[in-house]
Image (cartoon, grey):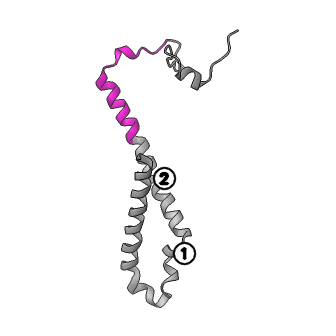
């Protein structure tokens, strides 16, 4: 009985191929065009990017909410909040965008 290889071991071999668990026959990548492969990769990347953007957006909001500087109730009383609301919204979202850009730059560098 041969040892089952881990996914990392399989990735490192030249003869690695994927067989869907529900299918007994081996997938044959040679029947797909380069365009098919590029479209599939782009589709996968777009889905991951969308989910990543959503998660990143929420994480930035959460961390900003934990930071004293970005808690609006530290700046005004309830009486003065109505006048300040529009300016606060702009201030918060400007810095939120800056943080997201910095995170994205750190990831891509």
The count of marks equals: 2
Whether residue 29 appears in magenta in the rendering, the answer is: yes
Disc 2 to disc 1, how far (Cα)?
22 Å
Q: Secondary structure at mark 2?
A: helix
Task: Indicate which label's residue lies in the foreground, 2 or 1.
Answer: 1
Q: Residue at x 32, y 25 (%)?
A: 36
Q: Position of residue 109 (x, y in %)?
A: 41, 47
Q: Residue at x 50, y 11 (%)?
A: 25
Q: Closer to the camera, 52 or 69?
A: 69
Say which quadrant the N terminus sits in: top right
Residue 89 vertical placement versus 11 (above, below): below
Q: Closer to the camera, 2 or 47?
A: 2
Q: Residue at x 47, y 54 (%)?
A: 56
Q: Position of residue 88 (x, y in %)?
A: 40, 77
Residue 68 badge: 1
Q: Position of residue 70 (x, y in %)?
A: 49, 73
Tell me, yes or no, whether the two marked residues, 2 and 1, touch with CB atoms within 8 Å: no
Q: Crowding near pointer 1: few (<14 within 10 Å), some, many (20+)?
A: few
Q: Which residues are magenta?
A: 26-46
Q: Secondary structure at mark 1?
A: helix
- Horizontal placement of 91 versus 79: left or right? left
Q: Position of residue 39 (x, y in %)?
A: 32, 31
The residue that label 2 is drawn on is 55
Q: Is residue 87 visible?
A: yes
Q: Crowding near pointer 2: few (<14 within 10 Å), some, many (20+)?
A: few
Mark toward the start of the polypeptide (2 vs 1) = 2
């Amino acid at each position: 009985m041969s040892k089952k290889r881990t996914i990392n071991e399989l990735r490192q071999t030249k003869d690695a191929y994927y067989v869907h668990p529900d299918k007994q026959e081996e997938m044959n990548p040679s029947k797909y065009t380069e365009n098919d492969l590029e479209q599939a990769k782009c589709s996968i990347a777009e889905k991951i990017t969308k989910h990543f953007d959503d998660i990143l957006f929420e994480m930035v909001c959460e961390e900003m909410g934990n930071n004293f500087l970005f808690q609006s109730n530290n700046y005004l009383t309830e009486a003065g909040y109505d006048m300040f609301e529009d300016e606060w919204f702009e201030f918060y979202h400007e810095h939120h965008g800056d943080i997201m850009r910095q995170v994205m730059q750190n990831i891509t560098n």
